[in-house]
Image (cartoon, rainbow, N blue to C red):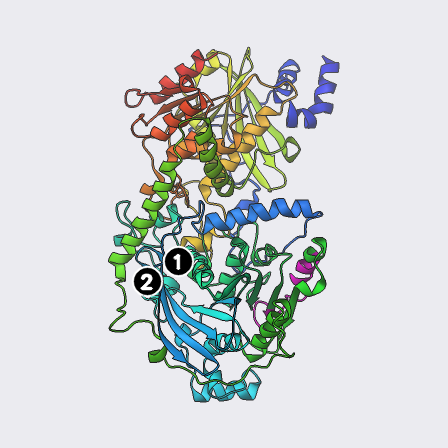
Amino acid sequence: MQTSLRCFVACRPALARRNWHVTVALAIGVGLLVARGADAAGPRVLLEDKRPSDARLAPPKDLNGYFPFSVPATAEAWARRAERVRQQIALSQGLWPMPPRTPLNAVVHGLIDQGDYTVEKVYFQSVPGFYVTGNLYRPKGRSGRVPGVLFPHGHWNDGRFIDIGRQAVRREIVAGSERFEEGGRSLLQALPVQVARMGCVCFHYDMIGYADSQQLSFQLAHRFAQQRPEMNSPESWGLFSPQAESYLQSIMGLQTWNSIRALDFLLSLPDVDGGRIAVTGASGGGTQTMLLAALDPRVSLAFPAVMVSTAMQGGCTCENACYLRIDTGNVEFAALFAPKPQGMTAANDWTKEMATKGFPELAALYRLLGAPPQQVQLFAFTHFPHNYNYVSRSAFYNFLNKHFRLGLEEPVVEEDYPRLTREQLTVWDAVHPAPPGGEAFERALCRQLAQTTRSQLEELTPRDAASLARWRSVLKPAAEVILGRELPASRDLEFEKTHESTTPEGLQFAGLLRHKPAGEELPVLFLLPQPWHGRTVIWLSGEGKAGLFAADGSVAAAVRPLLAAGVAVAGIDLMLQGEFLAPGSGPARNRPVNNPRQFAGYTYGYNRPLLVQRAHDVLSLVAFMRDHEQKPKTVELVALDETAPIAALALTAARGAVDRVALDTRGFRFLQVHDYLDASFLPGGAKYGDLPAWIALAAPTPLWLAGETPSSAPLVAAVYAAEGHTSALVWASPPEGQADAHAVRWLVDAR
């Protein structure tokens, strides 16, 4: 007995981490059980006034956080990381999978001859019925193909039509920001004019809600502040609604797609050299520049101005989207363009520290990839405020001249030009009338985009091994981005036992499960029958680990048959369940960032949704259960209430680690969530086939499934059939209120 006691005390830390059932058995043998009372909430792990020490309880990160970039050790490591970040960008923009490129039906009209260059009016459809508008600047007197330049503008008043007026431009001239009283009144005309004079074709196109792009208004696209209940319906929704976010539809995504289609248009012109394509823009246009350059390999030179920074990432609704900057940021977005030529500017704004925070890392990455120093350059004009002024534009002209080998005398100097008015530049007139817009158009556009996605995925419905592989090639990367975590490694987990006691059913003990790298701490509780036959069930509940107990503190009736069959049962307080909450707290909700505007992208562009955080917790417990020195024969998962979507998402990363699953979805669908702060809200949740798609990714894991039928979830049936494991799928139809008893019977009967 004394030897056993000494062994238990000496070995307790390691045993608590890796071999809990041996620890408990030793404790029983030496009489060290500590009884602890159970109330209606079940036994606690922490004292009543304590909460888990979990990093996720800190205020959520927002666009004003710190976003450093770390250079990987090798080019191979960077290639893997770059692929992952590109995938994240594409998904965040609603561009995974990439939509079909429908006909542009481009119209080019109204040529204006400016002597040494021409200006034309352009509109085309990025998707049927949704128009991109702008002006095309072409050099005169050139033969053969010439370089092409895309110019997305930022948040300057009136966009393409900007005219700051005589007094304002005179102040700019005095400050050294502009040279000419006429041409300097429109910085957004000055650049394409000069680019055309340098021998390039330049397409200058509108941001949504600016100038001629009015199908979606400026107020909607850039000033959205409050949810619109009348536009939040699963049958017919508008942008910024929970339904739109569930399909990853956003203003930013539409602008990114417009940029890709603008490049399609530019490359369709017979006088444009597809091997020399540049994109530049400042502020919000710099954001568009970074994303287009990161996603589209056809871009060969990028010049994002006053936007690449480790500080503020872009404040407009059109610069934010769910998932976009979780664990990444603008400096890494710019890094995705390496080793191709890239220039950027800094000013006396959030980019002012770029020379010491961000650019050194970019330069180091370019060196790692074998690029010469001149391939990436920072032009730090921090004596000017936020701008794309004459000085900054000159940096772009000379960078373009050098890398596209235009052969112009350096330095390239911008000259004055005859500025065109709004009336001269607009693409709409009596012959070319503006298309309809407004809320009806907005609803129709969202419906059309959703139908396009559904059609794409229906074509991928698995029918055999080959189609199953194609379906997984789309769904699995989407799940990886949304979940953002793999099954944790054992070295990342530790368990600290806090108490243990005996019950009529066996041994009960509890403690804190920690995911050390993430700073997460989870109250968990284990019910270990005597004898234990090696099977373990993780029982998820909307009440957390309290779901294992009845109101009087005894083990819940649904759980007892498992213990009687020698199956161990584990309960857990997921994030913002149980001991995470103060007494009397209401239902848990997602915590928004400190921003009064009710836009999901401001929160979920930087932070995982609560449902995803809870799926992370499930993965931690699954990995911990799998890693005992005396490994359990099986690890099984039960989720028969609102935790079913959590379990389904966790299973996308734990398919091989969970041996059997029982789910009751109760017919839940992400598209039905009406509040973007609801605990079950999941951006992108509906886009890929809603909850049945995430469940289907668990195939061929044996699955007991209630709340669904083959007709309500045909994708689940199709995937299991394509896997060749139809018999592993049980469609359950228990009487109301008896799902838990039927699921437990299925588990007990399993061998």
Q: Is residue 358 above or below residue 520?
A: below
Q: Are marks 2 and 1 in contact (CB under 8 Å)?
A: yes
Q: Residues within 10 Å of mark 2 (few under 14, many from 20)?
A: many
Q: Is residue 312 above or below residue 249?
A: below
Instruction: Give the overall secondary structure of the magenta segment.
Output: loop
Mark 1 lies on a secondary structure that is helix
**Image vertical order of residue 706 relative to residue 199, above or below:** above
Residue 222 position, x and y percent, is 39, 64
Q: Which residues are magenta?
A: 345-364
Kind of residue at disc 1: Ile
Q: Residue at x 63, y 41 (%)?
A: 517
Residue marked by disc 2? 216
Residue 72 percent coordinates (x, y): 68, 49
Which one is in front, 611 or 356?
356
Distance between mark 2 and mark 1 Cα atoms: 9 Å
Taking depth in this image into account, of 697 and 114 the one nearest to the observer is 114
Residue under pointer 1: 251
Spot occupied by residue 394 in the image (x, y as percentages of width and height): 59, 77
Residue 361 belongs to the span the image colors magenta: yes
